[in-house]
Image (cartoon, rainbow, N blue to C red):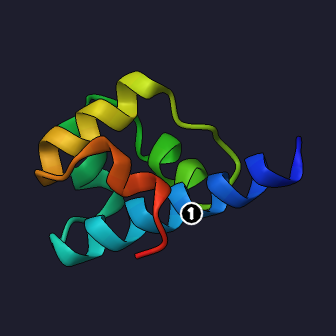
Amino acid sequence: MQEYEVMYHKIIASNIRKLRKEAKFSQEELAEKLNCSREFVSRAENLKEKISLKMLLKLSLLFNVEPQYFFCKN
């Protein structure tokens, strides 16, 4: 993976975790809302799973943020 890809992967994972915690969702609750597994959420937050554009769009709708939010250090 290129250096910039790793950097953005870390930023995206951090932003997902931040939004989930601010919403007071467990990983399991978030998984239910996204129609995916808790393991997927865990792997995404721990840099073991890349997030698809489709999943980023689902997350942005769920948390009411623009998709660009996930690419910025917050």
In depth, the one of 29 and 34 nearer the eye is 34
SS at mark 1 in the image: helix
In depth, the one of 2 and 32 nearer the eye is 2
Q: Residue at x 26, y 50 (%)?
A: 30
Q: Kindly indicate the quadrant of the structure image that contains residue 19.
A: bottom left
Q: How many marks?
A: 1
Q: Residue at x 40, y 76 (%)?
A: 74
Horizontal relation, residue 52 to residue 60: left or right:
right
| Residue 20 position in % (x across, y down) | 28, 65
Q: Amino acid at mark 1?
A: Ile
Horizontal relation, residue 57 to residue 62: left or right:
right
Q: Is residue 26 above or below residue 29?
A: below
In depth, the one of 31 and 49 nearer the eye is 49
Q: Kindly indicate the quadrant of the structure image that contains residue 35.
A: top left
User: Circle 1 sits on which residue?
Assistant: 11
| Residue 29 position in % (x across, y down) | 22, 53
| Residue 68 position in % (x across, y down) | 36, 48
Please tell me how crowded label 1 is: few (under 14), some (14-19), or many (20+) other residues with Cα within 10 Å.
Answer: some
Q: Quadrant of the N terminus?
A: top right
Looking at this rendering, what residue extends furthest in the top direction?
54
Q: Is residue 27 above or below residue 68?
A: below
Q: Residue at x 87, y 54 (%)?
A: 3
Q: Is residue 23 above or below residue 4?
A: below
Q: Residue at x 31, y 42 (%)?
A: 67
